[in-house]
Image (cartoon, grey):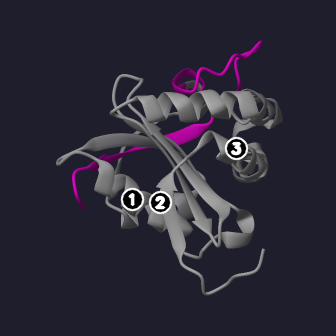
Amino acid sequence: MTESGAPVVVRTALIADAPSIAAIGSVAFPAVHHDVVGAEFAAAVVEQTYSIEALTACITQCSDADDAEFLVAEREGEVIGYLHYDSEGSEPELHRIYVDPAAKRGGVGSALLRELHARLPLGGQYILLVAETNEDARLFYERHGLVVESRVDGNRHYSTAMAIDLSVPPPPAPAFLMRYSGSA
């Protein structure tokens, strides 16, 4: 994909977007996390959360809930990024935000976060998990008003939050829980 001057449009994901989201996620998740979480865990995440069936269920669940969002960013009708946020766990959480590697550093992630923040209720808060070694991501989130709250085992947190079924517990992966509090 080449960079064009066309604007990025963020909208609610549709079931028809699942193949595009799967194509981005099954490449982007392992590319970012393989060395941090381990090959087995990365493969389990892709298999269990980026199948068309899993994405269809997640998009449907988010669209049926008042406190969840599954957003896509598109340019010229092509999905180039997505975001998944819900309140299913102990508190609201931004579970996934990924951009097509060819569109990175083009404002797509920022557009997705701005739209999520615009849709949150006044004073809305959420948490987000970021690998300790992913300094670029941490700095990106800090620019959008998130602050590091605590250090956790990322694999344990993510596998619980996303209901990843593992035959063997994954190795620990140091991560930060970051928090967004209201309009920053």
- Give whichever of discs 3 and 1 has the lower sequence position: 3
Residue 38 appears at what percent x and percent y? 77, 36
- Please report contact status of discs 1 and 2: CB closer than 8 Å, yes or no: yes
Left or right: where 72 falls relative to 179: right
Q: Disc 1 residue type?
A: Glu
Location of residue 7 in the rendering, given as x and y in whole percent from the top left corner: 54, 78
Report the quarter where the N terminus lies: bottom right
Kind of element beneath mark 1? helix
* Part of the protein shown in magenta: 157-184
Query: Is residue 1 highlighted in magenta?
Result: no
The residue where tag 1 is placed is: 115
The answer to which of marks 2 and 3 sits earlier in the sequence is 3
Displayed quadrant of residue 59: top right
Location of residue 43 in the rendering, given as x and y in whole percent from the top left corner: 80, 33
Task: Confirm whether residue 158 shows in the render.
Answer: no
- Cα–Cα gap, marks 2 and 3: 25 Å
What's the residue at 33%, 33% (across, down)? 66
Name the secondary structure under disc 3. Answer: helix
